Image: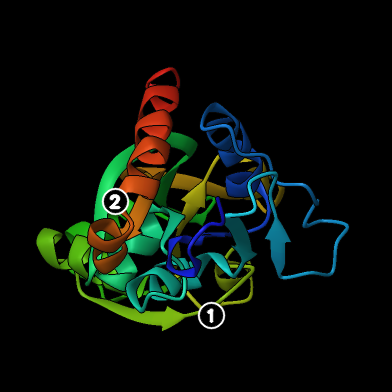
């Protein structure tokens, strides 16, 4: 029986850790990606199921592709979803993958506690502007937020900022650049996000995959 065109499913993933850690969840649903995004130049990757394809997009763009229906579902970090706002997205499952934490870090020797206590206005570099603003506002700390897209650690080293707000996994990059974590903002993991229209129109096709993802992700909890 030929699959109806409107039952084609598109999954949005980003390269790297999220892609690698999503593969076992896909396998649990009987889906295997047949090309490696690290070696293929293709942005649309086939799977062993002709009705399921994977698109490779920037991590911060996953929610947008899903929100507007260019992808039916995707995997995005909690950090990305908080910045995006989650509009138009159904977030059924915390997949318990790509775990890390969002933290404040400063140059070793900078007295962060005193600066915060004395009401100093801190300069902070981050790409998580919305989350950082809410965090510091809740603490009553005055900050000037500077948006960067990479190499946050450089900010304090060259005098651009007093602190950074960034994802931390092992802390190795911080240590290598003589920075220290001074505040834990929140734990981060990646979540499944689903286009709300697709959930209704393609429920029969999506539901078994969502259930397989949920069952497999519980093993990571």
Residue 70: x and y, percent? 46, 76
How many marks overall? Answer: 2
User: Is residue 26 in sight in this rendering?
Assistant: yes
Residue 95 figure quarter: top left
Above or below — where is 160 with respect to 40? below
Colour mode?
A: rainbow
Q: Nearer the viewer, residue 127 or 8?
A: 8
Above or below — where is 140 with respect to 49? below
Q: Nearer the viewer, residue 61 or 203?
A: 203
Residue at 33% x, 73% y: name it: 67
* Label whose residue precedes the other's in the sequence (2 or 1): 1
Q: Nearer the viewer, residue 64 or 165?
A: 64
Residue at 50% x, 68% y: name it: 5
Which quadrant holds the C terminus?
A: top left
Residue at 43% x, 68% y: name it: 6
Residue furthest to the front: 1
Residue 128: x and y, percent? 39, 68
Helix, strand or loop status at disc 2: helix
Residue at 60% x, 31% y: name it: 27
Residue furthest to the top: 219
Residue 113: x and y, percent? 29, 51
Residue under pointer 2: 203
Residue 57: x and y, percent? 60, 69
Q: Are marks 2 and 1 in contact (CB under 8 Å)?
A: no
Residue under pointer 1: 160
User: Is residue 184 in sight in this rendering?
Assistant: no
Above or below — where is 20 with respect to 65? above
How busy is the neighbourhood of tag 2: few (under 14 within 10 Å), some, or many (20 plus)?
some
């Amino acid at each position: 029986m030929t699959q109806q065109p409107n039952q084609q499913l598109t999954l949005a993933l980003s390269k790297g850790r999220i892609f690698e850690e999503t593969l076992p969840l896909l396998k649990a649903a009987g889906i295997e990606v047949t090309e490696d995004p690290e070696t293929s130049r293709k942005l649309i990757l086939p799977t062993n199921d002709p009705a399921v394809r994977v698109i490779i997009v920037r991590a911060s763009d996953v929610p947008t592709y899903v929100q507007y229906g260019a992808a039916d579902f995707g995997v995005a970090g909690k950090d990305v979803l908080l910045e995006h706002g989650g509009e138009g997205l159904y977030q059924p499952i915390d997949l318990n993958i790509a775990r890390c934490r969002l933290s404040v870090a400063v140059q070793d020797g900078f007295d962060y506690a005193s600066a915060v206590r004395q009401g100093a206005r801190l300069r902070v570099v981050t790409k998580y502007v919305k989350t950082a603003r809410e965090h510091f506002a809740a603490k009553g700390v005055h900050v000037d937020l500077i948006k960067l897209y990479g190499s946050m650690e450089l900010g304090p080293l060259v005098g651009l900022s007093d602190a950074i707000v960034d994802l931390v996994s092992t802390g190795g990059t911080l240590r290598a650049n003589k920075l220290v974590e001074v505040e834990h903002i929140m734990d981060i993991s990646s979540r499944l996000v689903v286009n709300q229209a697709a959930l209704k129109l393609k429920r029969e096709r999506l539901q078994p995959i969502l259930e397989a993802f949920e069952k497999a992700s519980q093993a990571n909890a």
